[in-house]
Amino acid sequence: MKKMTNTKRHTVVGWLFLLPAALLICFMSFRPIFQAFLTSLKTGIGNQMTFTGLSNYARLLEDKTLLTAVTNTLIYMIQIPVMLGLALWLATLLNRKGLKCKGLFRVLLFLPCATASVSYSLIFRIMFAYNGMINTFLVSAGILDTGYNFFGNPWSARLIILLALVWRWTGYNMVFLSAALQNIDESIYESAVLDGASELQKFFKITIPLIKPTLILLCIMTVNGTIQLYDESVNLTGGGPANSTLSISHYIYNLSFEYTPNFGYATAISFVIFVVVAVLSLIQMKVGDKRE
């Protein structure tokens, strides 16, 4: 028997170290995914579920409530460029030389992300209530004669969710972008200044290209998080008025636990969302991997 070379020995040892984690991932992740797909092909409850093929997936095309939830989720995507733009602006400000109390500002901006979703949802509900702080200010300033029912109008209710998302996650993204900006060698900017580059040229020709991988990562994370949005829809508006703020994840929950349980159909929606998230992530990574 031939003696194993060092390269093969290292390969075998590497796979032995990876094997427990790989088996755990297969058992904890891939197995439930496969079981979820099987469940999506059935209808009924518990042990009485029967195989019905692709009927649940066919129903997706006729479900008006699902269409409303998808439309709302697409509207919530508006917060992505706003939030990332605001996070980049704040990260740029906090990255300036000579700015005092940088650590304090970073902590204050990151705190909303550490706040429990139920807590900050209650705060926003109180602020935008009919007799809340926002209406009190608008009436006292003479902008409105009486309080406005923010949660009774579909577009104002969606706007509150968008504001809540931007408020909560801007600081989180700012931390990543701030770290990326700090990794840029200052000599690059100094060379650009010697070449006569303006501030805008430095920003778009140096800063943006060098932090592009971080921006792509944050974009992928934010898109995936928005597609799976749940807390704000449940805690802020309850999906109302008339499902006008209902998110896809909130609808899946209602199908499983609020309405007559329909785990097969709910799982079919979940599986489609899983595929959509995976495809979008792949596209974003491919688009962002244009190495020069």
Image (cartoon, rainbow, N blue to C red):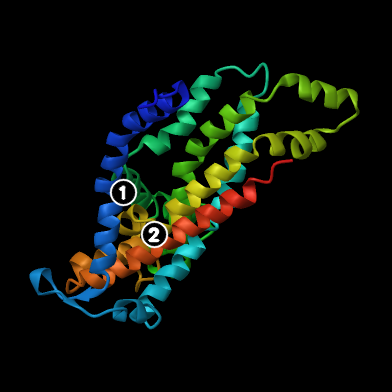
In this orientation, which residue lies closer to the viewer: 104 or 114? 114
Left or right: residue 39 versus residue 195 is left
Image quarter where the C terminus lies is top right
Give residue 191's quadrant in the image.
top right
Residue indicated by mark 2: 274
Left or right: residue 99 versus residue 34 is right
Q: Mark 1 vs mark 2: give the one in front.
A: 2
User: Residue 220: horizontal and vertical position, in percent?
Assistant: 52, 49
Q: Residue furthest bottom?
A: 62
Q: Compared to 140, does 188 lie above or below?
A: above
In this orientation, which residue lies closer to the viewer: 144 or 282? 282
Q: Residue furthest left?
A: 47
Image quarter where the N terminus lies is top left
- Say if residue 145 shows up in the picture: no
Residue indicated by mark 1: 122
Give residue 21's quadrant in the image.
top left
Whole-number angstrom distance, CA of label 1 to CA of label 2? 30 Å
Left or right: residue 16 versus residue 71 is left
User: Residue 264: horizontal and vertical position, in percent?
Assistant: 23, 71
Under mark 1, the amino acid is Leu
User: Residue 59: horizontal and vertical position, in percent?
Assistant: 34, 81
User: Residue 137: horizontal and vertical position, in percent?
Assistant: 47, 50
How many residues crowd mark 2 within 10 Å: few (<14), some (14–19), many (20+)? some
Q: Compared to 170, does 100 lie above or below?
A: above
**Residue, x 31% and y 62% (percent of image)?**
250
For marks 1 and 2 on the same chain, the one whose residue lies earlier in the sequence: 1
**Residue, x 91% and y 29% (percent of image)?**
196
Q: Secondary structure at mark 1?
A: helix
